[in-house]
Structure formats: structure tokens, C-alpha cells
Image (tube, rainbow, N blue to C red):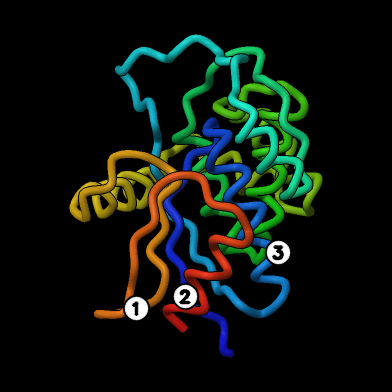
Amino acid sequence: MAAVPVVVWSDFTCPWSYVTEAALRRLEDEGRAAPRYAAFELYPAPAPLPPPDADWPDALRDLARAAGVELRPPVAAARTRKAHEAALFAAAKGAGRAMREAIFAAYFGDGLDVGRIDVLIALGAELGLDRSEMKAVLDIDALTGRVLGEAAAARRLGVDAVPALVIGEGTAATLMVGAQSREALREALEQVG
């Protein structure tokens, strides 16, 4: 079976997005999925940020364990537009997947504020991305239009929560909203593929 295209809208402060992306990466490694990630900022300014949520259901913890990701409650909520811009920048340099993993791990593992440009630049530098170029791109909002456009595309499809995945293309495509296990994703890929 050829890798099935998957468009994934997610946010870096959503633990459900984190575990779903981790499960999808395993299917990508198996050659079953060809994901393309799209930005969906859950709390764009001026919307108030929610308080950190430490009362996660067992189902989320089970999905995290199955996906092999460390999931600790964040210290504080963060705005994610710059994180989405950093992920787009990294993707253009061939490090998109690694940057996405680093941003999620920084937020849910290390408790870092992934809305801060200095944090994102440090994560990018660890992946070999040029600090100066990344800082310039983030400082001048060079990718803000793309981030906003990706979120607008999701809303046109009726997506108002993440993670949201469009699996496949054309009339055979299917929309899945909410956290997904590796098994559920595999089944959806097989049905569409």
C-alpha cells in the first residue's frame, strides 16, 4: 500500500494533538502515511489563555504511553502562533518533523513557553537551523499569513477543534476529529488507501 496523504491540523499546546501526531509518525515510518501538518492556534490573541490543565483523563495518559511520548502537565499556557511559524520555517529547511517533535517535547516535557521566540530559536539551533535567519523570519512575522491561512482553511471545512485529520484525497477522503490511537489511524488509512 502506498503512503496515504494526511492533512493534520493541530496545536502545540493540545496534549491530544501531541499523542495523535506521535502515533501518526509511527505510521509514517512504516510507509503507511504521508502527513502534512497545518497550523491551528487554539487561543489566538486576544482570546484569554486557559489555566494549565493537570487533570487529564486516563485515556489521554494511555494514548501517550502507547505513542511513546512523555506527557507532563505544562507549567503555564502559551500562545502558539510563533511556534507554528517556527515549524513552517523548519519544514522549509527539511527539519519540520524534528522541529514539531522538539516543540511538543519542550512544552509537555520541559515546561517551556513555546510562544517565546528565544525558546523556538534555541530549539531550532539544536536541529542545526540558522539562528539569525530564524530570528529574522519570526521577528518580522514572515509566516504569519500562512499560519492564519491554514487555520482559516480548517474553519471552512467546519473544523473547530484539534487534532483534526483529513485522511486521503478527493471523494474518498475522510475527516477524523479528536485524539486517535495508532490502531484507529491505521484502520482509517487502510479504508481510504
The answer to the question of whether label 1 and label 2 lie on touching residues, with beta carbons closer than 8 A, is yes
Q: Residue at x 69, y 38 (%)?
A: 62
Q: Residue at x 66, y 13 (%)?
A: 75
Q: Quadrant of the N terminus?
A: bottom right
The Cα atoms of the two marked residues, 1 and 2, are separated by 7 Å
Identify whether 156 is placed above or below 108.
below
Q: Which residue is mark 1?
A: 169
Q: Position of residue 40 (x, y in %)?
A: 39, 42
Q: Which residue is mark 3?
A: 26
Sequence order check: which comes first, mark 1 or mark 2?
2
SS class, disc 3: helix
Farthest residue, direction bottom: 1
Sequence order check: which comes first, mark 3 or mark 1?
3
Q: Position of residue 47 (x, y in %)?
A: 31, 18
SS class, disc 1: loop
The Cα atoms of the two marked residues, 3 and 1, are separated by 21 Å
Amino acid carrying mark 3 in the image:
Arg
Q: Position of residue 15 (x, y in %)?
A: 58, 34
Q: Residue at x 55, y 27 (%)?
A: 115
Sequence order check: which comes first, mark 2 or mark 3?
2
Q: Would residue 75 be found to the left or right of residue 136 on screen?
A: right
